[in-house]
Amino acid sequence: MKVLLFGIAKDIAGAPSITLDAAPEKVAVLREQLYQRYPRLRELRSCMIAVNKVYAADGDTLQPGDEIAVIPPVSGG
Amino acid sequence: MDVLIDIKEEITVQEAVDFVTTPDCGGIAVFVGTVRNATKGKPVQRLFFECYTPMALLELEKIARHTLTEMGIRKIAILHVSGDKLPGETVVVIAAASPHRAAAFAACQYAIDTLKETVPIWKKEYFEDGEVWVAAHP
């Protein structure tokens, strides 16, 4: 499963995207995997997950083909 | 078409105003966001805007649709830049048209406030002695 990273999350991971071996069942599991791999994500003011370009809740389920993105605190405008 | 949404390297106030100008609207309000030359007293040399463009366009569309269905707006344009920007340069333009001015002012306020909360765009500030992703940390 491919995961896109933006802003400071991209800097923390050192890459604009990463690939997970398997699709976690839920967003919460994905989040925990990301936190274990990149502990500095925990230090951010917030860290949202988007699934198929829509903000997801921790309880949402994931499918193998989903487009996942890590959304650190936004600062447009 | 009542909504113009775009993310690109160069935007102008005029293209937004031109889009929303329509004979049935007597009020057009415009918000223009530019690069401030300092943050907390420290001179800013430039900004860099990164966008998750496909999702950002969807979120901007949601904001625009809300002003049409809930706020009495007839036409709205929301334009945002990506890439490098220097102090004074325009980074966001919102133009909203309605028959009367109050709705247009309110829509601009709603659109910029919501954009800053929900749209996946990030800015990095470059100072003389380093750089920082804005608002990333508590």
Image (spheres, grey):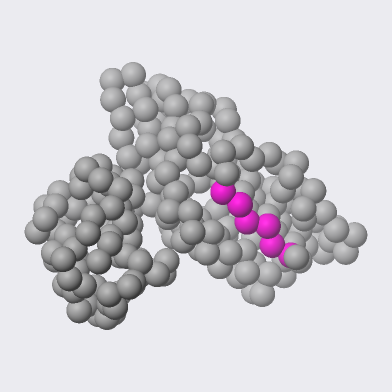
Using residue B93 as the reference point, say whether residue B97 is left or right of it: right
**Residue B126 included in the magenta stretch of the image:** no
In the current view of this chain or complex, which residue is farthest to the right? B23
How many numbered marks, from 0 up? 0
Q: Quadrant of residue B68?
A: bottom right
Front position in the image: A13 or B61: A13
Q: Residue at x 35, y 41 (%)?
A: B134
Residue B64: x percent and y percent?
Answer: 62, 64
Q: Quadrant of residue B106?
A: bottom right
Q: Residue at x 30, y 35 (%)?
A: B132
Residue segment shown in magenta: B2-7
**Residue B6 included in the magenta stretch of the image:** yes
The relative height of residue B24 versus residue B39 in the rendered view (above or below) is: below
Q: Can residue A30 be seen at all in this image of the molecule?
A: yes
In the current view of this chain or complex, which residue is farthest to the top? B128
Residue B116: x percent and y percent?
Answer: 46, 53
Residue A49: x percent and y percent?
Answer: 30, 65
Q: Residue at x 51, y 63 (%)?
A: B59
Q: Quadrant of the N terminus of chain B?
A: bottom right
Q: Residue at x 46, y 61 (%)?
A: B55
Residue B137: x percent and y percent?
Answer: 25, 46
In the current view of this chain or complex, which residue is farthest to the left? A36
The relative height of residue B84 versus residue B65 in the rendered view (above or below) is: above
Front position in the image: A64 or A61: A64
Using residue B83 as the reference point, say whether residue A32 is left or right of it: left
- State whether the magenta stretch is mostly helix, strand or loop: strand
Q: Can residue B101 be seen at all in this image of the molecule?
A: no
